[in-house]
Image: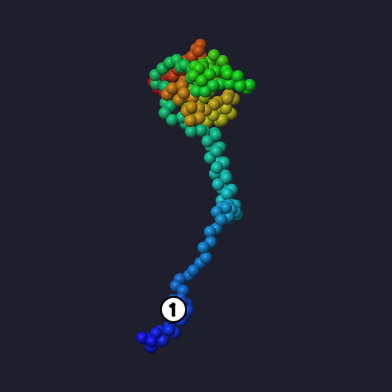
Amino acid sequence: MRRLLLSLLPILLLPASAGARDYGQHGAVFPVVERDLLAQIQSRLVAMERSGETARLNEQLKARTLARVERPAAVAGIVHARADRSWLFDPTIVLQQDIRGARGELIHAAGTRVNPLDSVALRSDLLFLDGDDAQQVAWALGQQGRPKLVLVNGAPLALMRARQRRFYFDQQGTLTSYFGIRAVPARVRQQGRRLEVSEIVLPVRAESGQ
């Protein structure tokens, strides 16, 4: 036993590293480096500027914007009137919160029913029309009292230049949806404390052969 211990002693006294083996390097090893996101964006923008891509994209955006201004998206679901239809519309609303003046004084309490026509009258009729329909445009321009002309389709700026009249556009169908209009031409006019809404069938033109 003493001889066995003496023979193992040199091995037990060796440093731990003496038992490790070097297996070499397998594959490339790279340091972990995370590139700053803002630096990447800046680099991309500089590259786009140098290549002319930025200028091209700006021109495309400008062209699309001008096209949408000249011809907004038509109001969905509006057709040409095939039958006369008329109804009264009550614009009264119920206030959801108190209305106060500049000094904090209470003007109307929440829950109060308010009719805007009691304070502000509709000074001129509203005419809704298809700006691409020459008959509707001619009809609207021939109405008395200088009504406000509101397109649901067409090119308002081109019509303004050609007709020297202001044309509005019912963006996203906000007004036609509010009044329940489904066909044009249509008229909205004040009748006392309510509004009369009418969808109007225009006479058939002689050139249509009907």
At x 57% / y 45%, what residue is drawn? 58
Q: Nearer the viewer, residue 164 or 84?
A: 84
Q: Amino acid at mark 1?
A: Gly
Towards the viewer: 48 or 83: 48
Residue 48 seen in render: no
Q: Residue at x 49, y 24 (%)?
A: 175
| Residue at (58% x, 24% y) in the render | 165
| Numbered disc total | 1
Q: Position of residue 183 (x, y in %)?
A: 43, 23
Query: What residue would you read off at disc 1?
Result: 19
Name which quarter of the figure residue 66 lies in: top right
Secondary structure beneath label 1: helix
Q: Quarter of the image holding residue 120?
A: top right
Closest to the observer: 73 or 36? 36
Q: Answer whether residue 65 is visible to the viewer in this image.
A: yes
Q: Residue at x 48, y 30 (%)?
A: 172
Quadrant in which the N terminus appears: bottom left
Instruction: Please state the horizontal and vertical placement of residue 170, each as a whole percent of the image.
Output: 50, 27
- Dividing the image into 4 quarters, which one contains the C terminus? top left
Question: Extreme front residue here?
Answer: 2
Q: Position of residue 25 (x, y in %)?
A: 46, 74
